[in-house]
Structures are given as C-alpha cells and as structure tokens.
Amino acid sequence: MAVSYTAVVNVDGEGRNGGHVRSSDGLLATSLALPKELGGAGTATNPEQLLAAGWAACFLGALRRAATGRKIRLTSTAITAEVTLTHGDDGEFSLSAVLSPVLGGVDEATAQELANAAHQICPYSKATRDNVPVTINASAAA
C-alpha cells in the first residue's frame, strides 16, 4: 500500500492537562487542558475535541465520496460529532461516539444510506471499528 500522507504532531508538557500540541508544519499549534467536567480549567481544547474534529471532517469527505459513487448530488453537508470519554467501575477509560450528519438534496432514507456507506469508507471509522461504539444519526437538511 502506498503512503498518501503522514501527519506528525508533537505533544509536550502534561499531555491532556496542560500540554501543548504542535504539528511539524506549524499549522496546528494549541494548548491542552482538562475540561471543566473532569475538574480542569476548561481553558483549552482536549483530545476528545480534536478526535471529534478530525473524525467529522474525514467523515464528510467519505460522505461526498459515497454520494459521488452513487451519482447523488448533495447540495450541502454538515456534521456534529460527539466523542464521549467514559470510565467504568474498574477505573478504565474508553470512548464512544455519535456522528450526526445533515445532508442536503436527499431524503431521510438516502441520508442514512450514505452515512452508513461513509462509515465503511472513512479511515477514522475503520480505525475505531469494533473498539469504539458508534451511533450514526443521519438526517436530511430541511
């Protein structure tokens, strides 16, 4: 398999609680902080937000690819991605996700069909398959 692209990111400091993220090209440079819900200051982004952003962006690309492959013209695309950090009674942490794309130019059934197809195409979905519970709630734009 040929390599298409490799992202290189360095995180230093305290990781999710006071660390700093910087990509090798300098386009991504931000601080990290625990969200208020986890007892932190909530003054910077966190790994769950970064994962949600990347997954959502990738998923929209996969949706457009699925639509193109079916010769469906989408008039608009938007998505809300929710990545939830949970912990069990044993103290172990895990993730779950809800992806809610809204597609223009199609009906509800077609929106869900395209979202299901995108979930098979999207590299983030592939990487988390059978490891992260994912709910997909697609809808047609009003």
Image: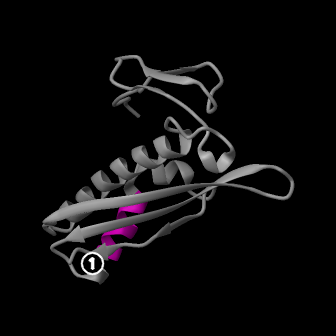
Is 4 positioned to the left or the right of 124 in the image? left
Front residue of 17 and 75 = 17
Front residue of 127 and 3 = 127
* Residue 41 lies in quadrant: top right
Residue 75 colored in magenta in the image = no
Residue 48 in the image, given as x and y percentages of width and height: 54, 45
* Residue 110 lies in quadrant: bottom left
Is 83 positioned to the left or the right of 90 in the image? left
- Name the kind of residue labelled 1 in the image: Thr
Q: Quadrant of the C terminus?
A: bottom left
Q: How is the image coloured?
A: one colour
Q: Main secondary structure of the magenta part?
A: helix
Residue 58 in the image, given as x and y percentages of width and height: 35, 48
User: What are the residue bounds of the magenta stretch?
Assistant: 110-120
Disc 1: which residue: 110
Residue 76 in the image, given as x and y percentages of width and height: 17, 63
